[in-house]
Amino acid sequence: MRNLLNTIQQAENKKVAIGHFNIANLEQLKAISNVAIQMDLPVIIGVSEGEREFIGVQRVRDIIDSYNREFGKDSSVEGFWLFLNADHTHSLEKAKEAVEAKFDAVIFDGSKLDKDENIIKTAEAVSTLKTIYPSICIEGELGYIGSGSEIHDALPEGAVIKEKDLTKPEEAVEFVQKTGVTFFSPAVGNVHGMFKNAPNPKLNIKRIKDIKDALKDAQGKSIPLVLHGGSGISDDDFVSAIDAGINIIHISTELRRAWREGMDKAFKENPNEVAPYKLSADAVTTMENVVENRLKLFNKF
């Protein structure tokens, strides 16, 4: 079985990032996997609490396993492999469900809490979940960047984008040391979702680098950093963020929008068609284009 942490370390050595894509249906998984197989790259499949409830916790684990059995490169840290992440989990009960199903990673999201409460609850989650499944990777978040993979009219209430409100390096060190998380997600100007009539805010690349450097240990190794809210971020910012130390990049809204555009096109052009797999073909193609563009950028093809 491939190890997510080792795969991320290999990506960091190559100065590339692992793409993380959320799914809520088979069409999304098919589009992501088709591209990742063709490009022979590992990717992370994310399912939020709502997505897990819709698909089924064990069912999504079984489907991912079937892809890896058929197409996965299990002998190294490179090549195609699907890792499975329990994205944005807000309760210990829901986190336990994913860990008991042997997900590769779980995000315990306390980002909306104040820092001290976030640390306490995240540390409790790490301790409990590691007892159930010692090799689980657990991500913690510090700094609220909104919630929901949506198209926004305005900045989500409470989301922080001003420099003074972004995650500070010393806060990152305190959070990681006190919680014991495997991955860390800071607020560095990123926002969940996309804006209707404007680009997403620019990332604070210096803050990413400062956090990465602050988290280095005595051997010079740093904890993997995760960038949420990747949809809508400029290509230049993505490249700079990876160079500054980002290891995993989340894409969800962009994929959902591509699905909607593909389905709208199919319904318009085929008003009498009722076969779901025929109608879904356009949506798979539009999503494949998104995944390919993002993976090429993250891997600097």
Image: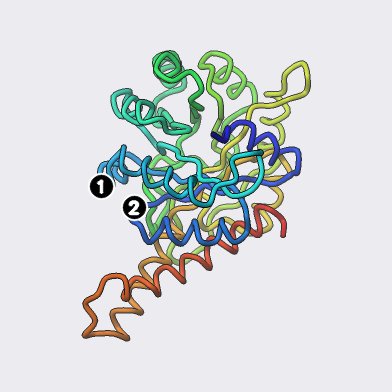
Residue corresponding to mark 2: 24
Percent x, y for residue 159? 44, 41
Q: Amino acid at mark 2?
A: Ala
- The numbered dot on residue 54 is 1
> 45 or 81: which is nearer to us?
81
- The numbered dot on residue 185 is none
Q: Are marks 2 and 1 in contact (CB under 8 Å)?
A: yes
With respect to residue 166, does 20 lie above or below?
Answer: below
Which callout, 2 or 1, points at the residue further toward the start of the chain? 2
The residue depicted at 65 percent of the width and 45 percent of the height is 17
The residue depicted at 35 percent of the width and 44 percent of the height is 60
Q: Secondary structure at mark 2?
A: loop
Place residue 11 in its image quadrant.
top right
With respect to residue 272, does 87 lie above or below?
Answer: above
For the N terminus, which image quadrant? top right
Percent x, y for residue 291? 53, 60
> 245 or 202: which is nearer to us?
245
Left or right: 37, with 148 as reference point: right
> 153 or 54: which is nearer to us?
54
Percent x, y for residue 215? 67, 24
The residue depicted at 64 percent of the width and 48 percent of the height is 79
With respect to residue 19, does 28 lie above or below?
Answer: below
Q: Amino acid at mark 1?
A: Phe
